Image: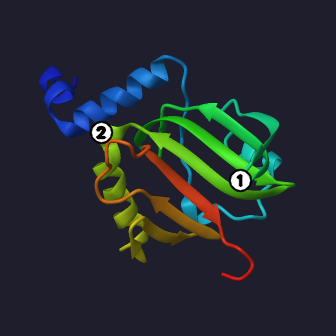
Amino acid sequence: MVPLFWLVLAEEGRRQSDIFFLWLFGKPTISLPFDLLHPSLTPADVVLKLPDVALTCSALATDFGDRVCQSPIAAFNSVPANHAAFFFAGEQLRAVKLNYQRSYHTYLIGRLLAALGEPVAMLPLHWHAGGGRILLAGRELQADDEPALLWLAATPTE
């Protein structure tokens, strides 16, 4: 049995509690290995790789393409979150946007440092991952920064 004070007072306990309650209200958790993200992924590939996520795909013109598949989520890679969106141009994955809970920004940076090493650029924080790059606003979120991780597919010239 987990002590109640750990769930309330410890950072790890609060993170686990947040994920549990979001899951309890019907939001799925996803494991998304960033090294597997690549422009060759199609909407059907993403749906197959995330079978527990009820992705809704629709035509939508954005800066990232002409189609988006999205869903509410409880967490990605153990980071409490609230939304995942996959953007496609034709049948090619162009971007992934994962909105997470603001209070876990530092935790997410730690996870990225452990998985991907030091960022190649600092503002925004920038890592190479899979067939593209991961971007975060910076080491600390400003009041007007959206708490979101963005993966962008590499362009042919990169």
Q: Please give left or right for residue 58 compared with residue 120 in the image.
A: right
Q: Please give left or right for residue 64 compared with residue 92 in the image.
A: left
Q: Are marks 1 and 2 in contact (CB under 8 Å)?
A: no
Q: Quadrant of the N terminus?
A: top left
Q: Looking at the image, is mark 1 or mark 2 earlier in the sequence?
A: 1
Examine the rendering and report whether any part of residue 130 can be seen.
no
The residue tagged with tag 1: helix, strand or loop?
loop
Tell me the residue at 30%/59% (across/down): 139
Q: Which mark is residue 103?
A: 2
Picture layout, residue 42 above or below residue 56: below
| Label 1: few (<14), some (14–19) or many (≥20) C-alpha neighbours in 10 Å | few
| Badge nearest the viewer, 1 or 2 | 1
Q: What's under tag 1, amino acid-wise?
A: Asp
The residue tagged with tag 2: helix, strand or loop?
helix
Q: Please give left or right for residue 30 compared with residue 110 in the image.
A: right
Q: What's under tag 2, amino acid-wise?
A: Ser
Q: Which residue is mark 1?
A: 63
- The percent position of residue 63, horizontal first and vertical second, equals 71, 53
Tell me the residue at 65%/70% (across/down): 131
Picture layout, residue 79 above or below residue 118: above
Q: Front-most of 43 and 121?
A: 121
